[in-house]
Image (cartoon, coloured by chain):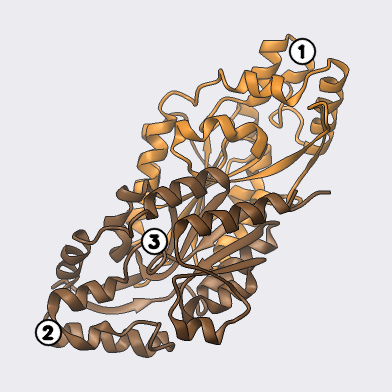
Chain colours: A brown, B orange
Amino acid sequence: MYKNPSVMAMDFEGVLIPEIWIAVAEKTGIEELYLTTREVPDYEALMNGRLRILKENNITLMDIQNVIGTVEPLNGASDFLSWARKKTQVIILTDSFYEFVKPFMPRLEYPTIFCNSLEIDEKGTITGYHLRQKDGKRKAVIALKNIGFEVISIGDSYNDATMLSTADYGILYRPSEKVVQDFPQFKVCDNYGDLRKYIEDYLSSDE
Amino acid sequence: MYKNPSVMAMDFEGVLIPEIWIAVAEKTGIEELYLTTREVPDYEALMNGRLRILKENNITLMDIQNVIGTVEPLNGASDFLSWARKKTQVIILTDSFYEFVKPFMPRLEYPTIFCNSLEIDEKGTITGYHLRQKDGKRKAVIALKNIGFEVISIGDSYNDATMLSTADYGILYRPSEKVVQDFPQFKVCDNYGDLRKYIEDYLSSDE
């Protein structure tokens, strides 16, 4: 029986790399920057707060890129991604920004990644951000399904829930306990070995 | 002013690798296999003819994969693709099949590629094929535009025309003279250096 070919639509921060804003919080010592979508599900409120704090502290894009340059992908992430790209087609879906993810790309061998964009003024201050669309991860999954793909989706937090629900198969990777409680319908795993196994089992059950 | 981020949706055969069926024709000496979508725009008629010929000549998937294993990407293709993946997001859109393109993937560092699928019987004979959808390249471009991307598209032949028309910027790469005559609206170029320049100019004009 014919089954649609698969695409893996996976989140970036928390799944392949650490949370960028937490790294910035650690480096700058600004407590408020520790908040992520794990704690504040309203992304717009979270982002506007972050930009206000950066402005107040005169932190530029270059300062943040310098921090990001010191952050390594999660242990095993690069190997997992290489494995996945041999097994199926992979598209990383993130609410983060091209300007932030760029330093990671060479270390991950230039995967395809769909991001949002920042607005920068002439002094290098981040003055705003543009989402490609609202609920962009979910809409990307819908688009992939509409062009004939079966979609496996991996995420870790609240902003991944609609993407995981929309996918044919949704997996939570290292979610907080609260996320697990709120979304009991998703498979959960906490290491790349198990994640490979879940994906492998799912792909081979397709045949 | 905000502009949508870009995705490059590019054809595979004739743009990054030689025509697979021509390689098979050369290796097997079967004249009829020299026909491609350049000569026969009706893809379904073309494919059904090819499968009939393979069956008549007892050529299996493994025979074809052995031929493909000897075919190199076009001269400069790998460098061009690496360059493009640093500049923007790249998705290869091809009417070919996962089973055929597989040997090229390691040599091109596992780009994201959207293909169709073959149906194989227990003897390894190709008994059929499945298109993800009709006019799949164009629909993939529409899907990318709908999720907030500006799409640059590159192709060489008739089966790329609707994709190029739908994209925000369409470029014909090494097309036949007939294709150039039939589609005078597209930019045309015949080497990767010019192709880079066209893309670079287009991307920088976006800002």
- Tag in front: 1 or 3: 3
Q: Quadrant of the N terminus of chain B?
A: bottom left
**Which residue is more in the foreground, A43 or B2?**
A43
Badge 2: how crowded within 10 Å, few (<14), some, or many (20+)? few
Looking at marks 2 and 3 on the same chain, the residue that comes earlier in the sequence is marked by 3
- Tag in front: 2 or 3: 3
Lateral position of residue A128 relative to residue A151, left or right: left
Could you tell me which residue is drawn at 47 percent across and 34 percent down? B106
**Disc ID at residue B31:** 1
Lateral position of residue B76 relative to residue A147, left or right: left
Secondary structure at badge 1 equals: helix
What's the chain of the residue with tag 1?
B
- Tag in front: 2 or 1: 2
Could you tell me which residue is drawn at 43 percent across and 68 percent down? A94
What's the chain of the residue with tag 3?
A
Could you tell me which residue is drawn at 65 percent across and 49 percent down? B137
Pointer 3: what residue? Answer: A16
Amino acid under label 2? Asn
Tell me: residue A85, above or below residue B23: below
The span from disc 2 to disc 1 (Cα, nearest Å) is 71 Å
Q: Position of residue B187 (x, y in %)?
A: 50, 42
Q: Residue furthest top?
A: B29
Could you tell me which residue is drawn at 44 percent across and 71 percent down? A174
Give the image quarter of residue B166: bottom right
Amino acid under label 1? Glu
Pointer 2: what residue? Answer: A57
Q: Position of residue A140 (x, y in %)?
A: 56, 67
Secondary structure at badge 2 equals: loop
**Disc ID at residue B158:** none
Q: Are marks 2 and 1 in contact (CB under 8 Å)?
A: no
Residue B166 seen anywhere in this rendered image of the structure: no
Amino acid under label 3? Leu
